[in-house]
Amino acid sequence: MTQTITIRDEELGGGAVNEFSLDCLTEHITVRELIRSRVFQEVKDHNAKQYQTEFNGLVQPTDSERTLNGFQMKKRRQIDWKKQFEQALEGFERNQILILVDDRQTESLEEEIEVGPQTVVTFLRLTLLVGG
């Protein structure tokens, strides 16, 4: 059964910057798989938009500038989700990103999360991540 979870992006000292839903095919998912699913979906959505130079995702693409609600790329290009995923994993391991599941902090990439219809996952960015 597909579960839909709410994903929120927040920055230290600020409120929610971005909020969206992510479908999960199982009731249990590791933190690593959650990050992969999230990064893959946001990059796929961005790459499908032919003329978009704005990117509102977890990792700042290389060759882009920070904006109020995301990043502005100098020119339209495809983003590599695998590079973004690697940067996100590195950010988690270096405590540059905290992931809270229903206000409880996750500790490792292999930690398993139980997903339910009311699950809210917050990605708290402590520093900007650049890659992809």
Image (cartoon, rainbow, N blue to C red):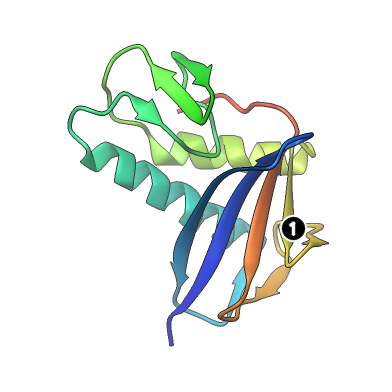
Tell me where residue 49 appears, x and y as whole percent.
22, 38
Mark 1 falls on what kind of element? strand
Q: Residue at x 78, y 59 (%)?
A: 106
For the view shown, which residue lies furthest in the front direction?
Answer: 15
Residue 65, percent from left and from top: 49, 14
Q: What residue type is disc 1 on?
A: Leu
Residue annotated with mark 1: 100
**Which image quarter: residue 7?**
bottom right
Residue at 55 percent across and 39 percent down: it is 58
Q: Is residue 15 left or right of residue 75?
A: right
Q: At 50% across and 80% down in the image, what residue appears?
A: 26
The quarter in which the N terminus is drawn is bottom left
Relative to 34, does residue 51 appear above or below in the rendering? above
Q: Is residue 54 left or right of residue 21?
A: left
Residue for point 78% across, 62% down? 103
Q: Residue furthest bottom?
A: 1
How far across and how far down the image is residue 24, in percent?
A: 47, 72
